[in-house]
């Protein structure tokens, strides 16, 4: 039955939608819409049902992204928060192919057509001929879109180093230096071109900032010293991160991208409404 095949594919389809939309709630809504479309159409005569379902999800997400273009998007993607011991099976499916939060940020900077071409072809091996049908372009033009997106990802989203222990060591060194107010130690652990992005939500615009360069980020990081006693280790999109808690209240999620033992990106979600929806 089609419903059984859809449910079997749900983890992978949700991963497609998350990479396309950067929002877990919107990804779930997109899957519901895709199921209704698939159920109405029926799968009679479809030889590759998983591929067919993937293209339906892609079409739904593309429509959402195109509608979103008229609204400025400054928010960070939803982080996927897992215990430090590791993600559960459902999260592992969502995070396959090392889709770190830094990569999700870069995907959010692509135009909808580039994002669809890159996500479906490069991440989920959908043939260019099939992606071209969704985009109403030629396969050659679709290949060019994916190529532009691939270069943007390569140039602006360095892959996190695979050793989680070394990632965690860099994060611990960052907080130790912040706690001690040690500017020199902060500069040692931060890459010279590090970027810090913080999203405080629409009701707290003064908490939404982008800082670039080790000196500016280190200057801001010294203010984190007072939070050192409130942090706990977690995984954020499969890489080292922390939760900042005061009692039962989550104050912030901080994701770190560590490359060659230095922090190249920090993403801070401190929007109270989104944190409640994601964590509590």
Image: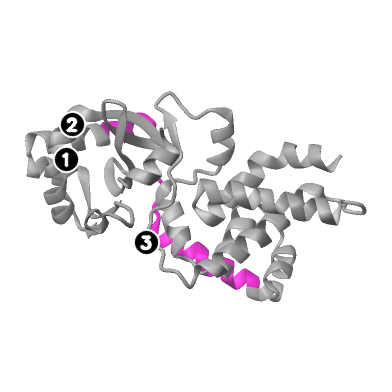
**Contact (CB < 8 A) between labels 2 and 1?**
yes
Can residue 69 be seen here? The reply is yes
On screen, 115 above or below 139? Answer: above
Q: Residue 96 appears in which quarter of the rendering?
A: top right
On screen, 130 above or below 50? Answer: below
Label number found at residue 132: none
Q: In the image, what residue occupies the spot 54% across and 44% down?
A: 97
Check residue 84 for magenta coloring. Answer: no
Quarter placement of the N terminus: top right
Q: Which residues are magenta?
A: 142-169
Quarter placement of the C terminus: top left
Residue receiving disc 2 = 228
Dot 3 or dot 1, earlier in sequence: 3
User: Disc 3 on helix, strand or loop?
Assistant: loop
Q: Is residue 19 left or right of residue 252?
A: right
Residue receiving disc 1 = 224
Could you give the CA–CA distance between mark 2 and mark 3, rounded to whole angstroms?
Answer: 27 Å
**Residue 236 position within the rendered picture, expressed as x and y whole percent measured from the top left:** 40, 38
**Residue 153 position within the rendered picture, expressed as x and y whole percent measured from the top left:** 45, 59
Residue receiving disc 3 = 74
């Amino acid at each position: 039955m089609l419903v059984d095949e859809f449910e079997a594919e749900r983890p992978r389809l949700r991963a497609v939608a998350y990479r396309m939309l950067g929002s877990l709630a919107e990804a779930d809504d997109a899957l519901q819409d895709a199921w209704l479309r698939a159920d109405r159409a029926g799968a009679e005569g479809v030889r590759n049902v998983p591929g067919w379902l993937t293209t339906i999800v892609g079409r739904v997400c593309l429509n959402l992204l195109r509608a979103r273009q008229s609204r400025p998007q400054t928010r960070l993607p939803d982080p996927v928060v897992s215990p430090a011991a590791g993600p559960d099976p459902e999260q592992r499916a969502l995070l396959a192919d090392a889709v770190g939060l830094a990569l999700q940020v870069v995907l959010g900077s692509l135009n909808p057509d580039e994002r669809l071409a890159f996500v479906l072809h490069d991440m989920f091996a959908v043939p260019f001929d099939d992606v071209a049908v969704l985009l109403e372009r030629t396969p050659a033009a679709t290949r060019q879109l994916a190529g532009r997106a691939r270069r943007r990802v390569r140039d602006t989203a360095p892959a996190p180093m695979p050793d989680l222990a070394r990632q965690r060591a860099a994060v611990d060194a960052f907080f130790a230096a912040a706690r001690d107010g040690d500017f020199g130690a902060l500069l040692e652990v931060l890459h010279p071109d590090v970027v810090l992005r913080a999203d405080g939500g629409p009701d707290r615009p003064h908490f939404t900032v982008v800082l670039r360069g080790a000196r500016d980020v280190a200057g801001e990081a010294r203010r984190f010293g007072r939070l050192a006693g409130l942090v706990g280790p977690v995984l954020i999109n499969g890489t080292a991160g922390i939760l900042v808690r005061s009692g039962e209240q989550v104050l912030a999620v901080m994701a770190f991208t560590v490359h060659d033992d230095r922090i190249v990106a920090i993403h801070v979600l401190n929007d109270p409404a989104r944190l409640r929806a994601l964590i509590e």
